[in-house]
Image (tube, rainbow, N blue to C red):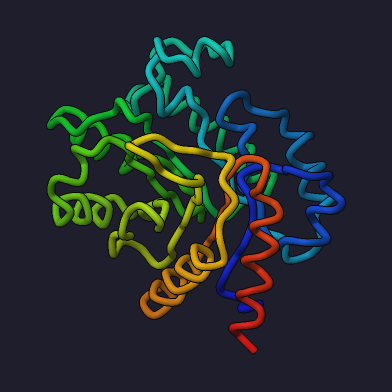
C-alpha cells in the first residue's frame, strides 16, 4: 500500500484487534458525541500498532447549535458553545478536544457543519475569527461544509479554506475537492438519492475504481490522502476491498 494513502473507517466497526490487523487508520467518531477520558484515548493509542494513524471528528458542542438534535441526544451541556463561533466557551471546548487528539497522537481533526449551517457574512466572519485563533499543535484541521450555499462561489470558498489553512473534507462521489491544503480528506458516506444519504450502501467495483482515480488525481498535487469509509454496515468490508484495489494498483 502506498505510504501516502491512509485507508480507514469512521469508527471501529469491528473489534479493535481485527481492525488494527487490517487497516492503517481510523477516524474516531465518539469525540463528536461525547469526549472520552484522556486515559481512554491513551489506551487506544497503546493498543494500536506502530505507524497506525488516528484522526477524529470534532465535538458537536463546537460545530452544531445548542438546539440541535445531536446536542439533545448526546446530552451536551456547554453554555456559550456552538456554531463555530469565536467564543471563550468554544475555545475552552477546543482545548478539551485538543487534549484527546494529543493523547491519540492524532494527525487530523474533522469539523463537520450541519446541513442547516448556511453561508452568511456573519458566519464567514465567525469562521475567520474561530479558526485563526485555534491552537493546532501540529494538527491538520479540515472542514466539511454541507449546506449548498457554500458552493455558490467555489473560488470564494477555496480562498477562505486557504486563508484559514483548512483542508476541504468531501465525499468525492458527490463533490469535487477544492484545491486547499497539502492533504486530501475523503469521507465516503454511501449513496446519495435526491439530496439524502443512504448510509447502508455497498460500493460497487466501478464506484471504488472511481474513488481510486479521485485519490490518484489528488496525489498529483498533494502529499497525502485520507480515505475514510462511513457507509454503515458495509464500511469495514468496503475499506478492505478498496485497500486491496489500491495495493494491486501500486504494484
**Residue 3 position within the rendered picture, expressed as x and y whole percent measured from the top left:** 62, 76
Of 211 and 221, the residue lying toward us: 211
Task: For the N terminus, give its image quadrant.
Answer: bottom right
Q: Position of residue 151 (x, y in %)?
A: 20, 46
Residue 185 position within the rendered picture, expressed as x and y whole percent measured from the top left: 46, 57
| Relative side of 117 to 45, left or right | left
Which residue is at a point 56% across and 66% down the rendered structure image?
A: 205
Residue drawn at x 51%, y 56% is: 138
Image vertical order of residue 39 relative to residue 169, above or below: above
- Give the side of residue 173 with respect to residue 16, left or right: left
The C terminus sits in image quarter: bottom right
Give above or below for 91 relative to 78: below
Q: Is residue 8 above or below residue 34?
A: below
The quadrant where residue 8 appears: bottom right
Considering depth in this image, is 8 or 173 the residue closer to the camera? 173
Image side of residue 135 versus residue 51, left or right: left
Residue 177, image quadrant: bottom left
Spot occupied by residue 183 in the image (x, y as percentages of width and height): 44, 65
- x 59%, y 83%: residue: 249
Residue 15 image-quadrant placement: top right
Q: Residue extending furthest bottom?
A: 251
Amino acid at each position: 500500500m502506498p505510504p501516502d494513502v491512509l485507508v480507514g473507517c469512521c469508527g471501529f466497526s469491528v473489534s479493535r484487534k481485527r481492525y488494527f490487523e487490517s487497516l492503517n487508520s481510523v477516524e474516531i467518531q465518539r469525540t463528536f458525541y461525547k469526549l472520552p477520558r484522556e486515559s481512554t484515548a491513551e489506551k487506544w493509542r497503546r493498543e494500536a500498532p506502530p505507524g497506525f494513524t488516528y484522526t477524529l471528528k470534532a465535538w458537536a458542542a463546537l460545530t452544531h447549535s445548542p438546539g440541535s438534535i445531536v446536542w439533545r441526544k448526546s446530552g451536551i451541556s456547554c453554555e456559550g458553545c456552538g456554531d463555530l463561533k469565536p467564543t471563550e466557551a468554544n475555545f475552552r471546548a477546543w482545548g478539551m478536544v485538543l487534549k484527546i487528539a494529543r493523547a491519540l497522537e492524532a494527525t487530523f481533526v474533522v469539523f463537520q457543519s450541519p446541513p442547516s449551517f448556511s453561508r452568511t457574512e456573519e458566519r464567514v466572519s465567525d469562521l475567520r475569527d474561530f479558526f485563526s485563533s485555534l491552537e493546532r499543535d501540529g494538527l491538520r484541521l479540515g472542514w466539511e461544509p454541507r449546506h449548498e450555499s457554500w458552493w455558490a462561489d467555489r473560488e470564494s470558498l477555496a480562498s477562505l479554506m486557504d486563508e484559514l489553512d483548512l483542508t476541504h473534507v468531501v465525499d468525492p462521489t458527490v463533490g469535487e475537492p477544492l484545491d486547499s491544503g497539502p492533504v486530501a480528506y475523503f469521507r465516503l458516506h454511501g449513496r446519495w438519492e435526491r439530496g439524502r444519504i443512504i448510509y447502508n450502501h455497498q460500493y460497487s467495483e466501478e464506484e471504488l475504481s472511481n474513488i481510486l482515480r479521485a485519490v490518484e488525481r489528488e496525489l498529483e498535487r498533494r502529499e497525502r490522502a485520507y480515505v475514510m469509509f462511513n457507509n454503515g454496515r458495509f464500511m469495514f468490508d468496503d475499506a478492505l476491498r478498496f485497500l486491496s484495489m489500491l495495493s494491486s494498483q501500486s504494484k
